[in-house]
Amino acid sequence: MSKFLFVVPPFFGHVSPTLSIGASLIARGHNVKWFGITPLADKHIPAGGEYIYSETDLLEHQEELQKILKRQDDGPACSGPEVMKLALEETYIPIARIMMNSLGKVVDDWKPNVIVNDCITFAGALCAHIKGIPCVTTTPVPPDVMGNSAESTPKIFEWQQNLVKGLQQEFGVYGDEIVIHSNKMNIVFTSQEFAGITDPMPHMKFVGPVKGRPNNAAFDWERLKIVTTPKVFVSLGTLLVDIRKEFFQKLIDAFAGTELTIIAATNPDIFEQWPDNFIVNGFVPQAELMPEMDVVICHGGFNTVNDTFMNGLPMLITPIAYDHFHTAKLIENAGCGIKIRYKRLRTVDMRNAVFELLANPKYKSAAQNVQETFIKAGGNDRAVQLLEEFSNRAQMVASFD
Amino acid sequence: MDNIAAAKLNNDEIFDLMKQFITEVIGEEFVEEMDITMESSFTKDLEMDSIEIVSFSEKIKAHFGDQIDFTGWLSNMDLDQLINLDLGTIVNYIEECQ
């Protein structure tokens, strides 16, 4: 049996799939812990696992950390290049810096066999490199292969490389090698087909969506049962707080009183009253709800995207910032949805798009094609198999050292 | 000589042409809410995303042909140059390339 340490960022969307694989690893008898820098409620942690958060170690970083978290609210108002700066310069790199000391102590103390770092949580792989521990990276988003490469945008590529190398040097890692991701195994939670990647590097392993993290959110199933109109699930994910009210106001303008039922995952407090054909809950058992739905509206958060196509449903995607645009492009390429950019979102277009998705069977059929590739990718079983093989191989190699 | 002089657009003409391209790309009703000037920044003021900028580049290519490598010019910029890119810079670039 092996000890797996997941190193996760303070963003639930990135933590979520690791909780699902972690639950499967625990079920197989492995020891699993998570390391993060913000508290995570016990109800999210799979039974038998442990989430390590050291308040004392982080005390000196608290002010900076809160600033970083608050800064994320600016994302939706930022342009593409500004978001890149916000993400790398103002989020990923400083978070890695904040993590290193506390993480190093945890690793020395618990001695995991494998460190699994989320793709934006650079400290995991950097610490693994420094301490000589085998490392796997998890990537919840479809990797952007055409993105900023040395060929397409040389100056942006150089900027990225310099920032990462600067971080590495701060912790005594010199040279040109990039060690913030594993170059041995990178588990990606989508299918190769959907990601549109024809010739992946051999260490990229596309396992599709994973499931099974604890989620005991209550839901009024009785109310859903008596609904006779098409059901539209709407989610804005967990991160985008400031624009929530504006987004759901558009939704109300578009769908109040229509022959549809809107099931929205958001805190109902943002409005005093919701239209009668809206069912609104702050937390929902999304994985259980999804099979009951007919269409999904979301901004392109990857967990909702995965749940949607795992159930073969068509999607209206309204990309706002970050990787949403890349995901929207993949959805258009696959033909399984319609994209309307949030900044150019008019209620009439939103309404027309949803009725088009319901009326035209080509979207559902394309969504079912994506579903097939997701199922074929193997999910939890494949991820666990890959992690076990990786851990066994690493321990065997170590025994010959 | 007259031919070349006639084909060459001055700054005002280029500005009007760019404004027309922008309108075609992002839609008239969104442009109506904006005050497009030489100082308008592409990403911040016009809120153009990468897909819209690509459509805009295609229109420039269709109009000017090979004499202007707009995409190549953009891809050699660093982030701050992209963030600060305004319509005036583009108009000047096209003016010089003609």
Image (cartoon, coloured by chain):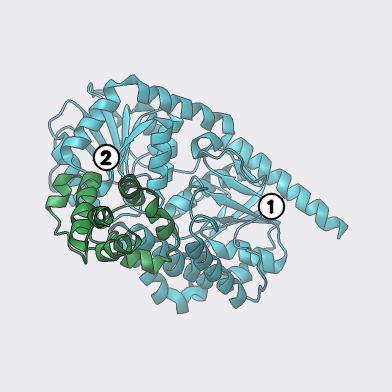
Chain colours: A cyan, B green
The residues tagged by marks 1 and 2 sit, at their Cα atoms, a distance apart of 40 Å
Residue A264, numbered circle: 2
**Residue B78 tag number:** none
Q: Is the residue at mark 1 from the same chain as the one at mark 2?
A: yes
Q: Nearer the viewer, residue A36 or A250?
A: A250
Q: Is residue A327 at least partly visible in the picture?
A: yes
Which of pointers 1 and 2 indicates the residue nearer the eye? 1
Quarter in which the C terminus of chain B is drawn = bottom left
Q: In the rendered view, would you say A325 is above or below A350?
A: below
Q: Chain of mark 2?
A: A
Secondary element under disc 2, as helix, strand or loop, is strand
Residue B66 position, x and y percent, is: 40, 50
Q: Check disc 2: other Cα within 10 Å, few if <14, some if 14-19, many if 20+.
A: many
Q: Amino acid at mark 2?
A: Ala
Q: From this viewpoint, which residue is outermost toward the right?
A: A400
Residue under the image location 62 percent in, 70 percent down = A104
Q: Nearer the viewer, residue A178 or B21?
A: B21
Judged from the image, the secondary structure of the residue bearing numbered disc 1 is loop
Is B65 left or right of A58, judged from the image as shown? left
- Name the residue: 31% across, 50% down: A320
Occupied quadrant, residue A259 = top left
User: Which is nearer the eye, A238 or A43?
Assistant: A238
Report x, y in % for residue A355.
23, 27
As shown in the figure, which amino acid type bears the numbered disc 1?
Lys
Q: Identify the residue under disc 1.
A: A184
Q: Earlier in the sequence, mark 1 or mark 2?
A: 1
Residue A177 image position (x, y, % from top left): 66, 65
Residue A223 visible at all: no
Callout 1: chain? A
